[in-house]
Amino acid sequence: MRCLTICSTALLLAISSFSSLADTETEKEQAKELSPYSVSFFKRQVASTNSVEHAIRSLLARYPEKTTQFAEVAFATYPEKYKEIISASVIAQPMYVDEIIKVANEYKVSDPADIVSIAISAEPSYAEVATKAACKYSPDHFEEIVKTAVQSEPDSADQIAQKLVTAYPNRTMEILVTTIKEVPYVGNYILDALLAVVQEDEEKSQELIITSMEQLADYPKAVERLVQLAHQHQVDAQLVKESAIKGGLSETEIVALIDQHYQD
């Protein structure tokens, strides 16, 4: 009974120390703020489970609200185990994927694209959330993150693109082109998803179609879908033709598509 009381007290002290961790600006400052007792406690958990991964999953299952704090201590104590830490944390508490990615970036455990790839592989259903978080915390690696995310989970490429366009409307074309370059076969779905974002604004919808025509002229399936969408949104056929030719499509090719799809 005495042992149980001591162990319980130790656990409470450790959890309390996790709660008192302060936010800091650099990796060194963060590491200094970690309580020695918290680090010691986590090491004992690892020793008792013989695995950093098992320790993380066990602790987060019991204390989900401490996900961020446990991730901080894990990265600071076992940085070489970052893959296991990210994966185990996301699997145990996927709703905290934003915070997990934030901490992983703060501790610079790997490059941002690698971090998002690990997170998506751990829980594919949270791919859009993980990608958005990665772009938010590492904006300088935006294109690389998008590319890695859609490669990691191509079946969710359209949802990832839609989520990102909603968050970063000024980077719509970058998101669209990068996604279709990496996953050409989902081009149609991505175009429909992006148009859904601006469906209340017909002028923006038409602008997106015309601009996309120029940017995606090298992707036949995307071009054909764009011509269909252009007709549906009553975009002037001459504008479609000019945009496609400007993007590199031959006049013969675009005229054939327009004749095929611009039939009432």
Image (cartoon, rainbow, N blue to C red):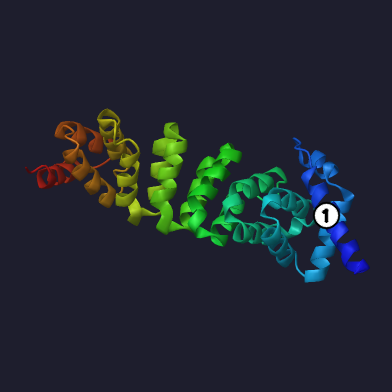
Q: Residue 246: x, y in percent?
A: 27, 34
Q: Residue 117: x, y in percent?
A: 56, 55
The answer to whether any part of residue 138 appears in the image is no
What amino acid is at disc 1?
Answer: Leu
Sort mark 1 into few (<14), some (14-19) or many (20+) by Cα contacts within 10 Å.
few
Is the residue 46 above or below the residue 250 in the image?
below
User: Residue shown at 28%/34% (left/top)?
Assistant: 205
Q: Quadrant of residue 184?
A: bottom left
Q: How many labels does the image show?
A: 1
Q: Is mark 1 on a helix, strand or loop?
A: helix
Q: Which residue lies furthest to the top in this view?
A: 203
User: Residue shown at 59%/46% (left/top)?
Assistant: 98
Which quadrant does the C terminus fall into? Answer: top left
User: Residue shown at 34%/54% (left/top)?
Assistant: 186
Q: Which residue lies furthest to the left in this view?
A: 264
- Residue 67 or residue 209, whichever sits in front: 67
Q: Residue 90: x, y in percent?
A: 61, 57
The answer to whether any part of residue 196 appears in the image is yes
Instruction: Say which residue label 1 marks.
Output: 12
Q: Residue 11: x, y in percent?
A: 83, 58
User: Residue shown at 81%/48% (left/top)?
Assistant: 16
- Residue 223 or residue 47, whichever sits in front: 47
Q: In which quarter of the image is residue 174?
A: top left
Which quadrant does the N terminus fall into? Answer: bottom right
